[in-house]
Amino acid sequence: MMCERMSLRRLLLSVLLLACMLPLAGAGLSVTASPITFFALDMQDPSVPDGLYGQIGITTACSSHVEITLTAIPQLTPSLLGAGAMGLRVGYDLIGGVPDTFFHLIIDAGALVVIDHAAGELSPLIEFHISPLAFGSRDYGYRDRLFTMGVLYDLHRSSWTLSWSTMTGEWYL
């Protein structure tokens, strides 16, 4: 148990350090926001408590095809801030470059730590997402991702969760 807490502390510290370094990437920052819903495949012991969540984040492009996103995901319903998550994702644009293409197909992989306040648990998850339709660019000042689907794997429970977001807005700073 003590080892797990140390590992989670190291993960959270790493995420915070990376967040401090994001502005140094210099490829332009953007702010993201979206509603997100999780669907546990193991209904007896879900990794993420039921409810609607909001997702907010900061994204920066590391190269023409690669971007990094730091996210915070608070629970909105049924219990405001009853649970939440922090995560770090690396995205890859399969169609075109992040700065110069209007249409995008983006895949993401990352890590997420879910905090369930009611149960007093921290759950580390590995996540994979695909955004089959994204449009916009830095030149336009925004980018929208439509119909983002994800699959998450809980490392402690050995269980799977699906995620869905109808639309994610991204505004470049």
Image (cartoon, rainbow, N blue to C red):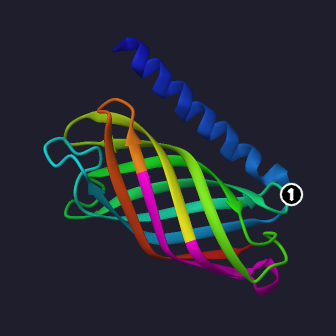
Residue 137 placement (x, y as % from top left): 76, 79
Dot 1 falls on a residue whose secondary structure is: loop
Please report the residue visible at 83 percent of the width from the left and 52 percent of the height from the top: 25
From the viewer's perspective, is residue 61 above or below residue 160?
A: below
Which stretch did the figure color magenta? 132-151
Q: Residue at x 33, y 46 (%)?
A: 160
In the rendered image, residue 62, in percent from the top left (x then y), is placed at 81, 54
Q: Position of residue 93 (x, y in %)?
A: 72, 65
Q: Is residue 121 above or below residue 111?
A: above
Q: Amino acid at mark 1?
A: Gly
**Figure check: 13 above or below 131:** above
> Is the C terminus in the top left, top right, bottom left or bottom right quadrant?
bottom right
Residue 61 on the magenta span: no
Where is the N terminus found, in terms of image quarters?
A: top left
Q: What is the quadrant of residue 159 in the picture?
A: top left
Outermost residue toward the front?
A: 95
What residue would you read off at disc 1?
26
Q: Does the magenta portion include 138?
A: yes
User: Going by the image, does 163 lie left or right of 52?
Assistant: right
Question: For the residue carrying disc 1, how many other residues have a C-alpha within 10 Å: few (<14), some (14-19), or many (20+)?
Answer: few
Front residue of this view, candidates 80 and 147: 147
Which residue extends farthest left? Answer: 44
Write down the quadrant of residue 92 in the picture.
bottom right
Residue 165: where, in percent of width, then height? 43, 71
Q: Residue at x 74, y 59 (%)?
A: 60
Q: Is residue 131 left or right of residue 51?
A: right
- Residue furthest bottom in the image: 140
User: Quick check: 24 left or right of 12?
Assistant: right
Q: Main secondary structure of the magenta part?
A: strand
Left/right placement of residue 65 relative to residue 4 reads: right
Q: Residue drawn at (54%, 31%), measured in percent from left and top?
A: 11
Q: Splitting the image into 4 quarters, where does residue 100 fall?
A: bottom right
